[in-house]
Amino acid sequence: MNLYAEYSQLNIPIIMPGKNSVGAGIVKHDKSNYLVRRDNEKEFTKFKGSKKKISAYFNNCQGIVNKLASNEFHIGTLREIVDYYNEICSGSDGYDDNGNTLADEEIQD
């Protein structure tokens, strides 16, 4: 799985009427979106801060679902979520052979 970022900037012209004059300016609005895509997917999935959407996308990895529920993971930790998925859950259902949740401390180098 890979993580991508999409950035854009909007320049919005504004006119500010004053009592005796008119002013003008530009307001800049930066926007970023994070996208993920598994190797077998053609389309990107965009996250806009919705933990429900993140949890649904990673529903095959119980460790991520649990960390989202406990607020350890959130949209600001998406890079860590993708790393966790790639290291622990990729190619698995997020559980070991005994049905226990796979967790970071269980990784053996």
Image: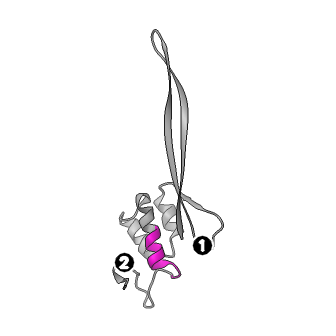
Which mark identifies residue 39? 1
Report the magenta residues as a range: 82-92
Which mark identifies residue 76? none
**The furthest residue to the right:** 42
In the rendered view of the protein, which quadrant contains the N terminus?
Answer: bottom right
Q: Residue at x 49, y 36 (%)?
A: 28
Q: Is 78 above or below relative to 63? A: above
Q: Residue at x 54, y 32 (%)?
A: 12
- Position in image of residue 21 (x %, y %): 48, 11
**The furthest residue to the bottom:** 98
Question: Does the magenta segment cover residue 90?
Answer: yes
Instruction: Name the amino acid type tagged 1.
Output: Asp
Residue bearing mark 2: 104
Is 15 situated left or right of 96 in this image?
right
Question: Does the magenta segment cover residue 44?
Answer: no
- Position in image of residue 51 (x %, y %): 46, 60
Instruction: Name the amino acid type tagged 2.
Output: Asp
**The furthest residue to the front:** 109
In front here: 81 or 71? 81
3D distance between C-alphas at marks 2 and 1: 23 Å
| Residue 81, quarter of picture | bottom left
How packed mark 2 is, by other alpha carbons closer than 10 Å (few <14, some 14-19, many 20 or more), is few
Which element carries disc 1, helix, strand or loop?
A: loop
Marks 2 and 1, the one that precedes in the sequence: 1
How packed mark 1 is, by other alpha carbons closer than 10 Å (few <14, some 14-19, many 20 or more), is few
Which element carries disc 2, helix, strand or loop?
A: helix
Q: Is 96 above or below relative to 16? A: below
Q: Residue at x 55, y 28 (%)?
A: 13
Q: Is 91 above or below relative to 36? A: below
